[in-house]
Image: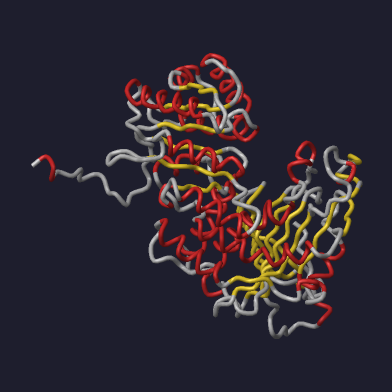
Amino acid sequence: MADDWTNPLRDPQDKRLPRIAGPGGMVIFGVTGDLARKKLLPAIYDLANRGLLPASFALVGYGRREWSKEYFENYVREAVEAGARTPFRENVWRRLAEGIHFVQGTFVDDEAFDRLAAKLAELDDSRGTAGNWAYYLSIPPDNFPDVCHQLDRAGLAQAGEENWRRVIIEKPFGHDLESAQELNRIVNSVFPETSVFRIDHYLGKETVQNILAMRFANQLFDPLWNSHYVDHVQITMAEDIGLGGRAGYYDGIGAARDVIQNHLLQLLALVAMEEPVAFTPEELQAEKIKVLRATEPVRPLSRTTARGQYSAGWQGSHYVKGLREEEGFDPESTTETYAACTLQINSRRWAGVPFYLRSGKRLGRRVTEIALVFKSAPHLPFADTMTTALGQNAMVIRVQPDEGVLMRFGSKVPGSTMEVRDVNMDFSYSESFTEQSPEAYERLILDALLDEASLFPTNEEVELSWKILDPVIEYWGKRGQPDEYPAGTWGPASADRMLEREGRTWRRP
């Protein structure tokens, strides 16, 4: 009788209750790095502070430094106090700190991984983590094979019938299609694809998820969301910072590999995908894959792409040095800090609509947005002098920093004459909701612990993204030095010409 009983007040489809992770723990490889210190450790504390982690949650750091448990605890606490979004509470910290441990070793050290296995088994007994472990690889991809092999050898990758093992991977997912396929082969030889979670932190942002809600929960937008009404789409990720201390790391990667291959192509897929059959990870991923399969660069690439490197200039009120003066950067390098390309989607909905993607450093301001620019009305009954200040209608989804949605359309200017000009209708998250959006890493770490894969790209999505971008990168590799653009501007002149050839201009965010 008891086995047949169900709680009449609980509906499995009801998502309003907080989702709390079950028994389990996390091992972070590369825990001494910047990402762990600035993002991962504060996110784990914030989840605990919100009551979304089990009281028995265990956090194990793995690294080369000879740290004791007490030293690692202090390191985590400093990171939490510096980066957590929720208030620091001593009782929450004490409970979390009980499960914090550190294992010293390298990625090729058999004995260290055996110690790690012993530590996790000990925590399963003492903390009740039930053999459920997530391994966060916050390390360069070159180290993935060693860590995956060691996890497999030490018996840490194999899940039992009643527990789970998952691996969380940070980008970059390779540097081209061939390396991505090899990386996927290595990881999938140890972990099945259903246990692999590839982090794209942009997909954890509230506004990105709101694209799905806005498109598929409203009747208003769908009739306009196609080539009959949309002239083109611009997806922009601009940063106002330079490379700084990352110059050595960034050389050889560039803006296209760093941002377009993952963040921007994922945004394109969410904007362009068809409505999924259901709001489940499998159905969402299936629709994104359909879009990526249909996407390709517009040719000739000499006219539909642009790249650049920032030179010295004024960033706001500060004069900053150019890329070639950055410490650790090869002055002869052809690595771009600005990349723009034109893509097309071969489907009935989007045929003939160019998607312009651009990303860059040392641009005018920090902003990420998606702009759907609509076609002009086929006929206007007004005299030309009445509409000189009227542009094309647009819908702008602001991903960061001021999350929201803006609609731009024409309105009559008050007065005795007919004059039409652009006005904005603006929805802002911060003004419409009192709830604070969770930080992207909070959402993604919790989803990985809950086995909720909707916001994680699959290996097929990663490989399709490289298939789209590889021809552009290969073309640039044969073209010598990128164009220069002064710091604080919006990119090289070649990027402006790229749109001017089609009678269009970049939106100024």
Nearer-the-camera pick, 474 or 76 = 474
Which residue is at a point 82% across and 81% down the rendered structure image?
384
Horizontal side, residue 8 vs residue 28: left or right: left
Which residue is at a point 82% across and 73% down the rendered structure image?
500
Which residue is at a point 62% across and 54% down the rendered structure image?
263
Nearer-the-camera pick, 420 or 29 = 29
Horizontal side, residue 245 vs residue 140: left or right: right
Which residue is at a point 68% across and 77% down the rendered structure image?
375
Give x and y (percent) for residue 168.
Answer: 50, 42
Quarter of image, res 421: bottom right
Horizontal side, residue 434 vs residue 485: left or right: left
Q: Is residue 371 above or below residue 51?
A: below
Nearer-the-camera pick, 357 or 483 = 483
Q: How many marks?
A: 0
Q: Is residue 341 above or below residue 129?
A: below
Quadrant for the C terminus in the image:
bottom right
Residue 309 visible in the snapshot: yes
Colour setup of the view = secondary structure
Quadrant for the N terminus in the image:
top left
Give x and y (percent) for residue 377.
Answer: 68, 80
Residue 390 visible in the snapshot: no
Horizontal side, residue 33 vs residue 331: left or right: left
